[in-house]
Image: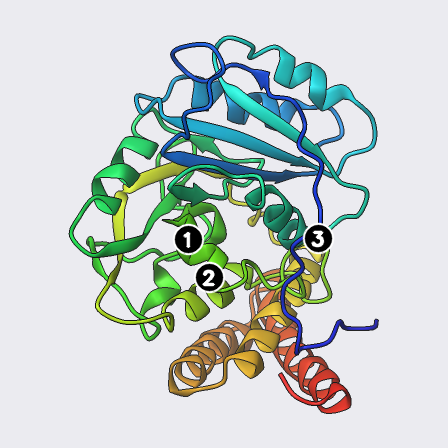
Amino acid sequence: MSVPSPASPTAFPASVSRPAPSGAPPGGPASSAAPDFSLVVATIDPDGALLQALLDSLANSTERSFEVIVADQTQGDHLARVIDGFAGRLHVRRLCLPARGASAARNAGAALARGRWIGFPDDDCRYQPDTLAAARRVLSMNGVRIATGRTVTAEQRPSVLRWRRAAGDFDRWNMFACLTEATLFAERALFLAVGGFDTRFGPGAPFPAAEGVELVDRMLREGSGWRARFDPAIQMEHPDKIPPWNRWAAQRFYRYAQGDGAFVVRRFGGHTLRWVVLTLGSAGLHTLVFRGWVSIAHAARIAGVCVGAWRYARAARREGGG
């Protein structure tokens, strides 16, 4: 697979058509007043069920100053019908994109955003009624420009990551238990200042993971005297895709780990080296204590990290550095 030049990490569109708003801002008719939050949803949703569930959850938000920008990479107009069902309850704009790639779609949606703060919910997550209110509380703290939270299952058990337990500030050394792209909220100006998501990372890209930590790693290098803060009260529902442990799980571990390996090379330093050593060590233990598909999946993760690092390094050498 050809990998885009490491020297050009992002791809904001040179020009983006601005679709007319569908629906209305929470609490009233469409207006020119900028909302506090812009939520950009990159989606490939064949039947609209995922977007319907996400918008249903946002309609119940106690925080009302937000807009939703749907970066639609799905064939057909069925998502337009889903969005129309929220007329009068939510301010939703739909941006139709011909190419697939979550990071490129998020960047295109961010180019239309008007809010002070920006977030990127996955299309298969659901906000809780107080998710945005909790994000506002943290972002309003003195010096905070990035706020992150955690995902939980429908039964309110932590999902996706082994999350940090207590609220607190974080940096590049300890960010790995504090965020995914879905739980990230940041000042829009900061997001734009670093060029947005690196379009080589994320679903649909050559390296299909690690786009969130790669972005935050760059944002944390932007200036000084400000804070990034994790708070588990910023909470949203997101299903665990694994278990079950099976061939699909092993393939997913392998694909996504290539993003992790590429990220380590892209942002090589003490913090990424420490993280990858811990990650590979944990995967190695799971592999050695053989438990069928669990061990196979973790062996696939080790292989994926190595392959991703090699592919990224090879592309960087070919094209003059990263």
Q: Position of residue 135 (x, y in %)?
A: 29, 40
| Residue ID for mark 2 | 193
In the picture, measured across the screen, residue 154 lies left or right of residue 243, that is: left
Of labels 1 and 3, earlier in sequence is 3
Query: Circle 1 — which element?
Result: helix
Query: Circle 3 — which element?
Result: loop
Corner quadrant of residue 313: bottom right
Q: Position of residue 231 (x, y in %)?
A: 25, 48
Who's the residue at 27% across and 71% down the image?
Answer: 224
Q: Which amino acid does label 2 sit on?
A: Ala
Do the numbered discs 2 and 1 sit on residues whose CB atoms are within 8 Å?
yes
Q: Compute the Cα span from label 3 to label 2.
A: 16 Å
Who's the residue at 63% across and 58% down the image?
Answer: 202
Q: Compute the Cα span from label 2 to label 1.
A: 6 Å
Query: Looking at this view, is 25 or 130 the one in front?
Result: 25
Q: What residue type is labelled 1?
A: Ala
Q: What residue type is labelled 3?
A: Ala
In the picture, measured across the screen, residue 140 lies left or right of residue 192, that is: left
Query: Residue 189's mark?
Result: 1
Query: Residue 14's mark?
Result: 3
Query: Circle 2 — which element?
Result: helix
Q: Compute the Cα span from label 1 to label 3.
A: 18 Å
Mark 1 burial class by Cα count in 10 Å: few <14, some 14-19, many 20+: few
Of labels 3 and 2, earlier in sequence is 3
Mark 3 burial class by Cα count in 10 Å: few <14, some 14-19, many 20+: few
Q: In which quarter of the image is the C terminus?
A: bottom right
